[in-house]
């Protein structure tokens, strides 16, 4: 079975209300971790952080090339852990992606 792209949506917990510089730093950490993982084609944070269940959370969207959704979720979890983030939820989105939208890893 070949790999295909999956969009993963994660809610990453933050210790407090992040300033713009904090979100930029988090984005840079995620991008640095993404460069080390060729199976992750894209990783983008979606500011602003929102207050949810007594915590601030920052939504992150990742595009992962994997054989199935469970492997894509695992790759996304590992990348976010490498970036030092704690995630409340990590779920596949309902959006179907094609190789034309997201080129496969080299």
Image (tube, rainbow, N blue to C red):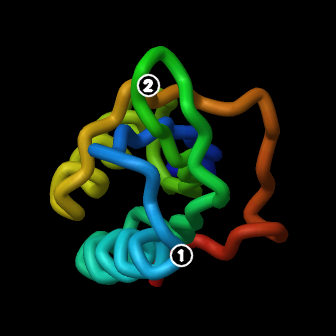
Task: Specify the label residue 89 is tagged with.
Answer: 2
Residue located at (54% from left, 24% from top): 52
| Above or below 70: residue 71 | below
| Cα gap from disc 1 to disc 2, whole angstroms | 23 Å
Counting from the top left corner in percent of width and height, residue 42 is at 56, 69
Q: Are marks 1 and 2 in contact (CB under 8 Å)?
A: no
Q: Is residue 4 visible?
A: no
Q: Is residue 104 visible?
A: yes
Residue located at (54% from left, 55% from top): 62
- Assign a secondary structure to mark 1: helix
Task: Specify the label residue 100 is tagged with.
Answer: none
Per the image, the residue denoted by label 1 is 20
Counting from the top left corner in percent of width and height, residue 7 is at 64, 46
Q: Nearer the viewer, residue 77 or 2?
A: 77
Mark 2, other Cα within 10 Å: few <14 / some 14–19 / many ≥20: few
Counting from the top left corner in percent of width and height, residue 94 is at 77, 28
Going by the image, does 1 lie left or right of 104? left
Going by the image, does 95 lie left or right of 23? right
| Above or below 13: residue 62 | below
Mark 1, other Cα within 10 Å: few <14 / some 14–19 / many ≥20: few
Counting from the top left corner in percent of width and height, residue 26 is at 37, 70
Q: Nearer the viewer, residue 50 or 98?
A: 50
């Amino acid at each position: 079975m070949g790999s295909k792209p999956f969009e993963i949506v994660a809610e990453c917990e933050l210790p407090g209300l992040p300033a713009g510089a904090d979100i930029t730093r988090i984005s840079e950490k995620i991008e640095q971790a993404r460069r080390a993982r060729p199976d992750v084609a894209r990783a983008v944070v979606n500011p602003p952080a929102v207050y949810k269940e007594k915590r601030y959370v920052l939504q992150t969207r990742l595009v992962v090339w994997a054989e199935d959704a469970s492997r894509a979720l695992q790759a996304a979890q590992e990348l976010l852990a490498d970036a030092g983030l704690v995630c409340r939820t990590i779920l596949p989105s309902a959006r179907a992606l094609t190789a034309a939208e997201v080129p496969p890893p080299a």
